[in-house]
Image (cartoon, rainbow, N blue to C red):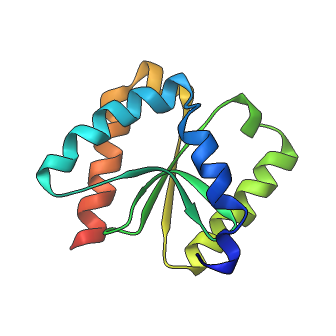
């Protein structure tokens, strides 16, 4: 295990057992696509952080943000986190839980468009 993941790996295991409703909805769709050769992992540790969903082959992270991500402090934390992940070669795309509930097709199209672009 990499040094930076010593704390994030146990947290990831805990989070996998407690997915939010929005995460369950998206996971049910991403998990179906594994049969097409593109595999996502849920609650995947990357350094000191845990990504909601990660496609390792495309180095793509999908984050679903609920209401806790709206404060100035949370926004600043998310920006630092995304900066760290980008420096590691990952692309981070974000959607709100509300987008998942109201526009699931658009969210999934955005994810698959990003996957395709990263795998080219």
The C terminus, quarter of image: bottom left
Q: Quadrant of residue 117?
A: bottom left
Q: How many marks?
A: 0
Question: How far across and how far down the image is residue 102, in percent?
Answer: 44, 19
- Seen as rendered, the residue at the extreme left is 36
Q: In this rendering, is residue 97 above or below 82? A: above
Q: Is residue 114 left or right of residue 74?
A: left
Q: Quadrant of residue 15?
A: top right
Question: How far across and how far down the image is residue 94, in percent?
Answer: 53, 47
**Who's the residue at 34% across and 48% down the image?**
111
**Who's the residue at 69% across and 79% down the image?**
3
The N terminus, quarter of image: bottom right
**Who's the residue at 73% across and 62% down the image?**
7
Question: How far across and how far down the image is residue 34, in percent?
Answer: 21, 49
Question: How far across and how far down the image is residue 103, in percent?
Answer: 39, 25
- Seen as rendered, the residue at the extreme top is 102
């Amino acid at each position: 295990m990499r040094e930076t993941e010593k704390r994030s790996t146990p947290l990831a295991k805990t989070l996998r057992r407690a997915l939010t409703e929005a995460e369950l909805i998206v996971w049910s769709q991403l998990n179906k696509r594994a049969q097409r050769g593109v595999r996502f992992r849920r609650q995947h540790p990357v350094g000191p952080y845990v990504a909601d969903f990660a496609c390792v082959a495309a180095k793509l992270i999908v984050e679903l943000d609920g209401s806790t991500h709206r404060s100035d402090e949370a926004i600043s934390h998310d920006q630092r986190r995304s900066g760290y992940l980008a420096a590691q070669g990952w692309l981070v795309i974000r959607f709100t839980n509300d987008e998942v509930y109201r526009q699931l097709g658009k969210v999934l199209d955005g994810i698959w468009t990003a996957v395709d672009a990263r795998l080219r």
